[in-house]
Image (spheres, rainbow, N blue to C red):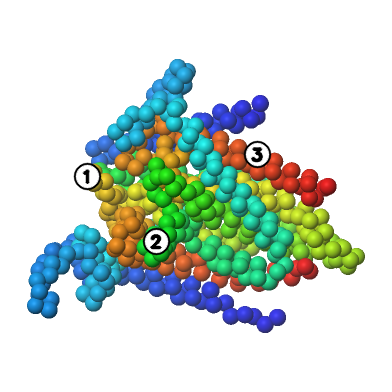
Amino acid sequence: MTYVKQLIGMFFLVIVVCGGPFMLYTQEEEIVFEPGNIVVHTVYLIQQIAEGSLGTYYSGQTERSIAEDILPFAISSFELLFASVGVAVLASIIFGLLLQRFRIVRQFQKVLNLLATIPDFILIVVSIVGAVGFYKLTNIRIITLSPISDSESTWFPITLLSIGPTIFLMKVVSLKYVQIGGEDYIKTALAKGMGIWHVLIHHVYKNIKPFLIADLKKTIAITVANLFIVEYLLNVVGLTRFIFSKDGGYEFNAAVMGLLGIILLSILVYVLIRLILYVIERAVVYK
Amino acid sequence: MRKRFNWALWLGCILVFFLMIIGVAGPYLAPYDIDYQVKVRNEMVNGKQVIISPPLAPSGEHLLGTDKWGYDLLTKLLHGAPYTIFITLLIALLRLLIGAWIGLYIGILDKQQRWWIAIENAWGYMPIFIPVYFLLKGININPELPTFTLVLFFVVVVAVLGTPSVAASIRQKTEQIKESQYVLAATSLGAGRDQIIFRHILPHLKEHLVIVLVTEMIATMTLMGLLGIFGLFVGGTTMYYDPVEYHSTTHEWAGLLGTYRSFVYTNYTWIFLIPLAAYMLAIGSFSLLAKGLRDKFEQTYSRTPFI
């Protein structure tokens, strides 16, 4: 029941957020604040949902049905989101936990920490500049900005999208590693002559896991924030297409559907990652 | 242990000081008027008539070059500097003040305030630029309001929306300190709530508050940059429809970044790279300052791992 309540609460939060442009606008050099406008649009939206359609939106000059487009858009957003969060979790477990004791990995993390001081969206923009420059120099194409090109490559957007969450999660894990590594029970385990891998998996991993899980939500939030930028800048056709149309028009129905879709996708990604972690744990830790 | 020289702190301090000076004196140092535009002209070079048209690459005449419409980039940057630097400072200060006030007074209460924690949790996962985007969308493009009102509106909206996260971290620290023996002793001696907050908790939070201020400046700057990418600039966006172009009215750095974004794909990359460099300089100096401060305060707590 609480889940249903939360979902309903989320729906209204999304409506309030998306209603911003109707609620707050200027008229004859004065700011007009009219929350009532949201109600009108919401009623219209709910009517359309009740009729079985999700309404329409404009892509350039053509009017398209949201219901037809939402599934393919959601799938491509999901691919990006899931792959990037997956990369972040995997990389932070491997480099932040298992290989952390090697000097070279710690150096690598120092470089990443340096990168972390730059905002993610700047990293993304700079990578695009780099990719364009690389193409001019070598004629090797690594980005495709046209969404209908044959050589559609998903690895470049995935790489760009995974930079932010990987840096964040790896920092969390390696910080906890250093803290837990200083605990007395680790000293005891090592003094008893247990193997390093045993200590890593059974003592360090088990104690890091709660923090990993707790910060997984934040990681997904960071990935979603970056998803907007990656999809917008790299012309990936995904759910954010509904929210930010490039010619400046704003459509309420599409924005609500897009934002709701993204929230649902992030919940799905969270559940899937937890599931995968559980399976790996069963196979490796508690065999 | 010998103290290591904290170069991040020193460099950060110097750079931030330098930024402040640019912020105050920028518009007076600008080499050209803000409206000065380079026109297309003919010139004799080696006995040949050559058409000189903007964008002009960086040269002695235009230190950082001009943009496609003939405006001097250095002038634009210097005119935008006050907005960039003082708006971020103002927003971070407001967030800190409101956040500290809420965090301290909620943290000191005996009972956990469930409603507030629910707000903190829900807000923690919302990328802040989405609500800001939707709130600004209706009023910021081709604005009917004067620039000052728009800037003020932006400051208030961003400060208020960013407060819960600041309040959360201060509330948690307050709750920790509240449990300590000396607070108990003070209470049993008859100290009131304000006495405990100002005499016993705030002195412990001093260092934390300084770091929060600097990190909030970085967060605000990031937010401004993000909004710039999506065509919403602080102080108003002038939008042209044919072709669709967004121009910043205040020439604020994040706004210039957004205006010149499309030049990445042309041969005139410097038009984009120069605002980018300015923006990175600003954000980099605050990051250095934050890192330096954190190193300084955390030196005492470090432990070496056994593995």
Q: Compared with residue B126, is residue A71 higher up or lower down, i.e. above or below?
A: above
Disc 1 with disc 2 on a shared chain: no
**Relative height, residue A227 to residue A260 (above, below):** below
- Judged left or right of residue A95, residue A38 is left
Quadrant in which residue B29 is drawn: bottom left
Chain to which the residue tagged by mark 3 belongs: A
Picture quarter containing residue B250?
A: bottom left
CA–CA distance in space, label 1 to label 3: 46 Å
The picture quadrant where one finds residue B66 is bottom left
Amino acid at the residue labelled 3: Val
Q: Residue at x 29, y 63 (%)?
A: B268
The answer to whether marks 2 and 3 mark residues whose Cβ atoms lie closer than 8 Å is no
At label 1, which amino acid type do we have? Asp
Q: Given the current orientation, which residue lies at the most extreme bottom position?
A: B2
Alpha carbon separation for disc pair 2 and 3 = 41 Å
Residue at 43 percent across and 41 percent down: it is A237
The CA span between labels 1 and 2 is 32 Å
Q: Which residue is mark 3?
A: A271
Query: Which amino acid lies under the numbered mark 2 shown in the image of this protein?
Result: Asn
Location of residue B125 with respect to B68 vertically, above or below? above
Q: Position of residue B232 (x, y in %)?
A: 35, 48
Regarding residue B167, the answer to whether it shows in the image is no
Residue linked to disc 2:
A139
Front-most of A102 and B108?
A102
Dot label at residue B242: 1
Callout in the foreground (2, 3): 2
Q: Position of residue A195 (x, y in %)?
A: 84, 63
